[in-house]
Image (spheres, helix red, strand yellow):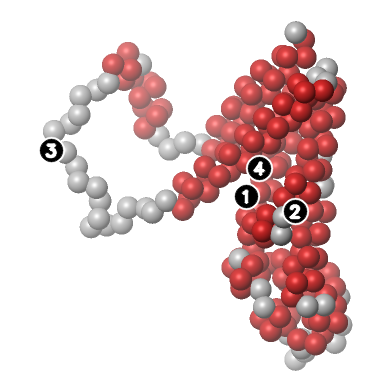
């Protein structure tokens, strides 16, 4: 049974879900119509052609990214909160972010978060080139961290029967391991990306904001 009532928001929501699950190439007007249980002409009536639909999805992404608001009592904690939220948003919509980048609108998507970072940099006493450097350092740290995480996720996992050959004799322990066995054990455990990101961001922000007191 076809829908009798269909809204533009429902079309965009379905298109958004389709892109998130399968990427922009999977977004076709026929596929979207089938997903919504309606005619292709109804999709065109609400959002126009595919290019118009992609533009609408980009605008939707920009609006959602604009909802990032800092939390915390100090500029440092608020900047870290913006960075953590920005990282989460990038992880939540990698295909949409890639689509935004392809359409040359990356800076527009990051603009709301950038404005929030600028406000906190000013509150911390940074001005001019120092404020710009702090804002960009935070942005680069977020994007760089996410890229590393994505690369790790895409790395091929070892499968049974194709494990790396193991040496018959154990390798000698390094000097660092002998001096600090707790360090060796900690490095042998899987990394906690969330904790690592927060720790590195706090250290970066502390160093950047210290410039405002010099």
Q: Which residue is mark 2?
A: 105
The label nearer to you, 4 versus 2, is 2
Relative to residue 38, is residue 135 depicted above or below?
above
Residue 205 in percent (x, y) is at: 68, 23
Q: CA distance from mark 3 to mark 4?
A: 42 Å
Q: CA distance from mark 1 to mark 3?
A: 41 Å
Q: CA distance from mark 2 to mark 3?
A: 54 Å
- The quarter in which the N terminus is drawn is bottom right
Asked whether the beta carbons under mark 4 and mark 1 sit within 8 Å of each other, the answer is yes
Towards the viewer: 192 or 39: 39
Q: In the orientation shown, which residue stands out farthest toward the left?
A: 168
Give the mark, 3 or 4, whose residue is nearer the N terminus.
4
Q: CA distance from mark 4 to mark 2?
A: 18 Å
| Residue appearing at x 71%, y 80% in the figure | 29
Q: CA distance from mark 2 to mark 1?
A: 18 Å
Give the mark, 1 or 3, whose residue is nearer the N terminus.
1
In the drawing, does residue 59 fall left or right of residue 14?
Answer: right
Give the mark, 2 or 3, whose residue is nearer the N terminus.
2
Residue 71: image tag: none
Q: Which residue is mark 4?
A: 87
Q: In the orientation shown, which residue stands out farthest toward the top?
A: 214
Residue 126 in percent (x, y) is at: 80, 19
In the drawing, does residue 183 fall left or right of residue 90?
Answer: left
Residue 200 in percent (x, y) is at: 59, 27
Q: Secondary structure at mark 1?
A: helix
Give the mark, 2 or 1, whose residue is nearer the N terminus.
1
| Residue appearing at x 19%, y 42% in the figure | 166
Residue 91: image tag: 1
Residue 76 visible from this viewpoint: yes
Residue 168: image tag: 3
């Amino acid at each position: 049974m076809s829908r009798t009532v269909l809204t533009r928001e429902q079309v965009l929501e379905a298109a958004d879900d389709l892109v998130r699950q399968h990427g922009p190439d999977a977004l076709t007007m026929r596929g979207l119509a089938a997903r919504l249980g309606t005619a292709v002409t109804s999709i065109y009536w609400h959002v126009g052609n595919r290019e118009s639909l992609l533009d609408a999805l980009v605008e939707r992404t920009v609006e959602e990214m604009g909802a990032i608001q800092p939390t915390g009592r100090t500029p440092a904690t608020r900047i870290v909160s913006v960075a953590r939220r920005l990282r989460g948003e990038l992880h939540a919509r990698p295909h949409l972010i890639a689509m935004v980048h392809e359409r040359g609108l990356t800076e527009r998507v990051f603009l709301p978060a950038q404005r929030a970072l600028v406000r906190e940099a000013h509150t911390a006493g940074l001005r001019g080139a120092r404020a710009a450097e702090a804002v960009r350092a935070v942005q680069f740290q977020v994007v760089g961290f996410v890229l590393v995480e994505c690369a790790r996720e895409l790395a091929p996992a070892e499968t049974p029967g194709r494990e790396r050959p193991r040496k018959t004799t154990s390798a000698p322990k390094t000097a660092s391991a002998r001096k600090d066995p707790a360090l060796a054990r900690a490095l042998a455990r899987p990394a906690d990306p969330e904790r690592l990101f927060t720790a590195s961001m706090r250290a970066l922000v502390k160093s950047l904001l210290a410039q405002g007191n010099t």
